[in-house]
Image: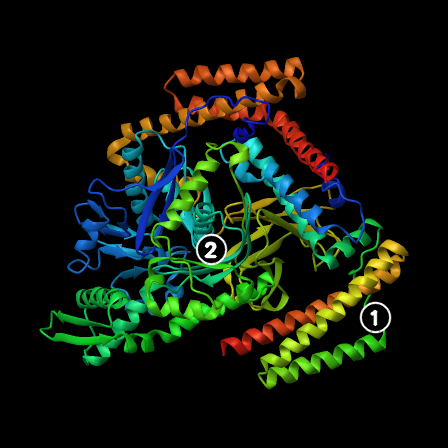
Amino acid sequence: MALLQISEPGMSAAPHQHRLAIGIDLGTTNSLVASVQSGLARVLDDERGRALLPSVVRYRADGRIDVGYDAQARQNEDPHNTIVSVKRFMGRGLADLGDPGRHPYKFVDAPGMVQLATAAGAKSPVEVSAEILKALRDRAERALGGELVGAVITVPAYFDDAQRQATKDAARLAGLNVLRLLNEPTAAAIAYGLDNAAEGVYAVYDLGGGTFDISILRLTRGVFEVLATNGDSALGGDDFDQRVFCWIVEQSHLTPLNAKDTRLLLTRARAAKEQLTEHDEARITALLSTGELVDLNLTSAVFNEISATLVNKTLAPTRRALRDAGLAPEDVKGVVMVGGATRMPCIRHAVGEFFGQTPLTNLDPDQVVSLGAAMQADVLAGNRAQDDDWLLLDVIPLSLGLETMGALVEKVIPRNTTIPAARAQEFTTFKDGQTAMSFHVVQGERELVSDCRSLAKFELRGIPPMVAGAARIRVTFQVDADGLLSVSAREQTSGVEAAITVKPSYGLSDDEIAGMLQDANAHAEQDMKARALNEQRVEGRGLIEATRAALALDGEALLAADERAAIEENIAELEAAMAGADHHAIKRTVEALNQATSEFAARRMDAGVKKALRGHKLDELSL
Amino acid sequence: MDFHANHFQLFDLPAHFRLDADKLESAYRKLQNEVHPDRFAAAGESEKRLSLQWATRVNEAFRTLSKPLARGAYLLHLQGIEAFSEKHTSFPPAFLMQQMEWREAIGAARQARSADALDRLTRELRAEARRMEEQFAAELDDRQDYEAAAATARKLKFMHKLIEEIGDAQEEIENA
């Protein structure tokens, strides 16, 4: 129910509890969780006062799992079982990784998404990410002292559908209710824009540990509108470490390294890169397991030289985004820098030069995304009054299309289309009596199917036999507010309907998620039941609260007496179920109440739309 | 408000090619404020579904009306004319000649890797597209000459394709 409509002008706001919602920045290198309390967004620290959680997970042979600093401390001695930068593998197959030899892991090829062999068995990147999210969820629950209604999880704007779906699956696996997947630069723009009352066109340049995003936004009072976004989902601070690592190997004439030495030198390379943020040179020393000693001096000049192509690699997407927005660099009022990697002087210099202005670095590039996510979570949870919130209009980063004859791509929804969006296209049969048709859904900008990412393949069966060209098969693409795609196909002429909704092939089914949850909680079945019950009660309470508020506002005007009585009855049934301990019963009655209010919801939506336009007319009169 | 109202009715605007962009924008934002899924993140399933449908509908309507070519084609569609149906493939010879000249110029600039020449061509083509849009407006709003307008729409579409090609060429040069 529309909680945000509770405080319409002239109406007193129905009292309701502050709902606990969090924003999570699930980063390649570090992750953070933040929340809005008493109107202020703040990052939640761990028990030792640290804001960052290193995105590192270590699997031990005895089944124990370390996350964060504890795992990070062991990465050099236990490189195979200590997973760092797992975000780079989200929604990716083995073939996507380029040279797997540059990672100290044992990869297992699995359909859809690569897995990593550890002492505790093969783990998918979704499971590894879920461990990080669980640690953040626990931290938030401890700090906030209550049940969370949900979380906003940020993703790189340039993440494709596979990567987004994987992120959402990880959140579900971690027991989080995902209020929204939010693009990282958009989150940063919210935090920056609200803090600085910014108006006009802004660019957000976001170079994280493993991903690069550039977003161009128009900020006006109460609206954050993404005009265009672009990026590279496999380019980040890690790559600068890699360049230094390669330089070390080359300079020291090292022979092929084992996993431990690779990890050690990568750690040293990163330390040197960070050293160069404040200093002109960095000394690199390491004693390898072979007895070889590395002792080098890296200067800024050399570092800039070996990383120049990486810096340039961020400028091409920046130009594309500006062109898609129909703007020139001088149209941009400010450039917000996000991501730890933007601390590098060479990046700041290149961005400043490109936009002809000093980039804005007055906010903590590590924290700003999580703060923006927390602010959005606060809005989505319904904690803000309608005249005190904002509207976010985001876009899809990559075009979505279908394979056609000759392995070519027919674009159905072009990149930078505002979401949610839907587009339909009609196809027909090419053989007499054809009863099935197959579809291949792809994402990307290139013309050839082989150059784009394959998202899903599915078949529409049961088309009634007709002469070639007589069938009318309508394929509909729907992208929701999380940027996630679903596709359906329907034969129109015969009256016989056959429809299918696909989830991308890498996606986990609800059953798989349930299975994984069960495995993870095998020793804690009681605990899981308690959690399920609690979750259902939270949902039930929310629904009752929202329904009552809606009834109080619009029940009189939009419902007949018997209709209202039917809804009240469903509320009573849900309340009765909530008093018991059967979470299935609560779920059933929640669904029943949802069902019972669907017509009411439709009328309220119509009324809302009419009201919006009436307001519009009043504005015209007052001009 | 009927979910199936046409795009102009949805935003409470007159069905004209010449429209007040500020009014469109403001009506769009007001409607999205009301129906966007972010307003229903804490709502029940039925409201979430409705919100997704409405917000999608409002985005589609806004996208169509905010772009001149799409808006004109939509006005023609409301008149029962599909400007881009496959029946219409013929163009006046003079227009085709002009197209070929532009295409050659783009090709030459691409070969010469001349960003300046491409910029010049973009400006020239945009100016020509604007002239066509004015003609389009007169045909649609003043003379109600829909057949002529449909022909103009097809020409405009060609212009957009050319401008897109220049963008691709520019990207090629920048990223080389």
Q: Position of residue A464 (x, y in %)?
A: 70, 47
Closer to the eye: label 2 or 1? 2
Looking at the picture, which amino acid does disc 1 mark?
Ser
Asked if one can make out residue A430 in the rendered structure from this viewpoint, the answer is yes
Q: Which mark is residue A157?
A: 2
Crowd around label 1: few <14 · some 14–19 · many ≥20 (10 Å): few
Q: Position of residue A416 (x, y in %)?
A: 57, 57
From what the image shows, is residue A560 above or below residue A27?
above
Separation of residues labelled 2 and 1 (CA atoms): 42 Å
Q: Position of residue A400 (x, y in %)?
A: 57, 57
Q: Residue at x 77, y 61 (%)?
A: B84
Q: Which residue is mark 1?
A: B90
From what the image shows, is residue A598 above or below residue A280?
above
Q: Which quadrant would residue B49 be assigned to in this image?
A: top right
Host chain of mark 2: A
Q: Position of residue A385 (x, y in %)?
A: 51, 31
